[in-house]
């Protein structure tokens, strides 16, 4: 049976690994599965190189790390056809989510975030593969909350350790108060359906810093959908959130993944932040993503969902 080859993502980074040689021949080998889980826990993300580009293999890779979870937002596009629960499609759509940064229009741009921050549970991981690669741009950025915590100034760490962030499912940038780039304009929003779903849902709360079972502290804060820190007035948040987010952004040491044919990427959603650089609206960019179940146990609703149907909207 062939073995896998593991090497660092990049020599100067404290996170991330590259794995080559993963095939149908070895993916069910318990020793390989254990090795992959150990690398994932240690490094926070893995770029799988030259792997079979099918949804079936994406699901097989995902299931090495845990069972799949259906995406919590019902309006998100699912992969049709094959019996592949949990594979969603993220595509360039000129009618939704177009932004302009420094005069340049972009589709599929997203700020630094962790997935499902608007939910009380945080999925364990996401796995992405590129179905259609934009010829320019379209990168996915990854940054490590463990490295971030270590590198933040002591006073910022202390403040963050006391704080809980409020997140909304309303992800339109026109209503995002903090953390947007300078010279930013939202050209088209995420759509009425998402706004209405967000209205039915309480905000979710997540700590800005948490401690892993293995002892490392993780700085885990995102401006995407954030409405400020719990227990602070609007005036206090308007001062504190930009001040702390600026400090966080300065200390991110990101890796920007330029997608190549044959790649799949998994990241630890409890530890990593990720972002999408976006691409020119004339290009197609189609990604397929799976979501791996789990929860770190520290998120909660600000108020309980009012009705079962509200809770069902997120089930
Ligand atoms: Fe994401």
Image: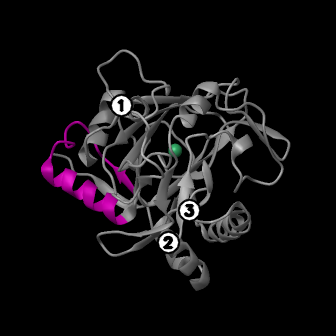
Label 1: which residue?
86
Does 290 lie within the magenta span? no
In the image: residue 201, left or right of residue 63: right
Disc nearer the start of the sequence (3/2): 2
Check if mark 1's residue and mark 3's residue have beta carbons within 8 Å: no
Residue 278: quadrant of the picture: top right
* Distance from Cα at disc 3 to Cα at disc 2: 25 Å
Q: Residue furthest top?
A: 81
Looking at mark 3, is its residue's CB closer than 8 Å to ligand 1?
Answer: no
Closest to the observer, 12 or 208: 208
Which residue is painted at 35% across and 52% down in the image?
19
Residues drawn in magenta: 18-42
Label 3: which residue?
230
Q: Secondary structure at mark 3?
A: loop
Q: Residue furthest bottom?
A: 154
Query: Where does residue 69 sit, x and y in percent of width and height?
Result: 33, 37
Q: Secondary structure at mark 1?
A: loop
In front: label 2 or label 1: 1
Residue 238: quadrant of the picture: bottom right
Query: Where does residue 196 sit, x and y in percent of width and height?
Result: 59, 29
Which residue is painted at 63% across and 28% down in the image?
92
Disc nearer the start of the sequence (2/1): 1
Looking at mark 1, is its residue's CB closer than 8 Å to ligand 1?
Answer: no
Which residue is painted at 29% across and 20% down in the image?
83
Q: Residue furthest front?
A: 306
Q: Quadrant of the N terminus?
A: top left
- Residue 162 is tagged as none
Looking at mark 2, is its residue's CB closer than 8 Å to ligand 1?
Answer: no
Closest to the observer, 19 or 123: 123
Label 2: which residue?
147
């Amino acid at each position: 049976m062939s073995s896998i080859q593991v090497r660092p993502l990049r020599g100067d980074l404290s996170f991330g690994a590259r794995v080559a040689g993963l095939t149908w021949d070895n993916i069910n080998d318990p020793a390989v599965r254990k090795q992959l889980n150990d690398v994932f826990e240690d490094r926070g993300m893995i770029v799988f190189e030259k792997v079979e580009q099918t949804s079936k293999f994406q699901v097989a890779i995902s299931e090495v790390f845990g069972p799949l979870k259906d995406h919590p937002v019902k309006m998100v596009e699912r992969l049709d056809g094959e019996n592949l629960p949990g594979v969603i499609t993220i595509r360039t759509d000129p009618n939704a989510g177009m932004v302009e940064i420094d005069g340049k229009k972009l589709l599929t741009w997203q700020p630094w975030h962790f997935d499902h921050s608007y939910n009380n549970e945080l999925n364990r991981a996401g796995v992405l593969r590129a179905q259609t690669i934009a010829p320019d741009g379209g990168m996915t950025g990854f940054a490590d909350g463990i490295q971030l915590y270590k590198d933040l100034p002591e006073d910022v760490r202390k403040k963050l350790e006391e704080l809980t962030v409020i997140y909304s499912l309303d992800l339109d940038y026109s209503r995002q108060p903090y953390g947007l780039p300078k010279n930013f304009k939202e050209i088209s929003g995420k759509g009425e359906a998402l706004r209405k779903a967000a209205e039915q849902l309480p905000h979710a709360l997540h700590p800005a810093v948490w401690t892993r079972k293995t002892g490392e502290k993780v700085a885990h804060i995102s401006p995407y959908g954030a409405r400020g820190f719990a227990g602070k007035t609007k005036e206090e948040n308007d001062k504190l959130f930009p001040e702390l987010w600026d400090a966080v952004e300065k200390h991110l040491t990101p890796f920007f993944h330029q997608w190549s044919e044959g790649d799949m990427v998994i990241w630890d959603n409890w530890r990593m932040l990720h972002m999408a650089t976006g691409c020119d609206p004339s290009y197609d960019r189609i990604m397929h993503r799976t979501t791996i179940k789990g929860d770190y146990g520290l998120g909660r609703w600000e108020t309980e969902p009012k009705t079962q149907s509200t809770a069902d909207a997120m089930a």
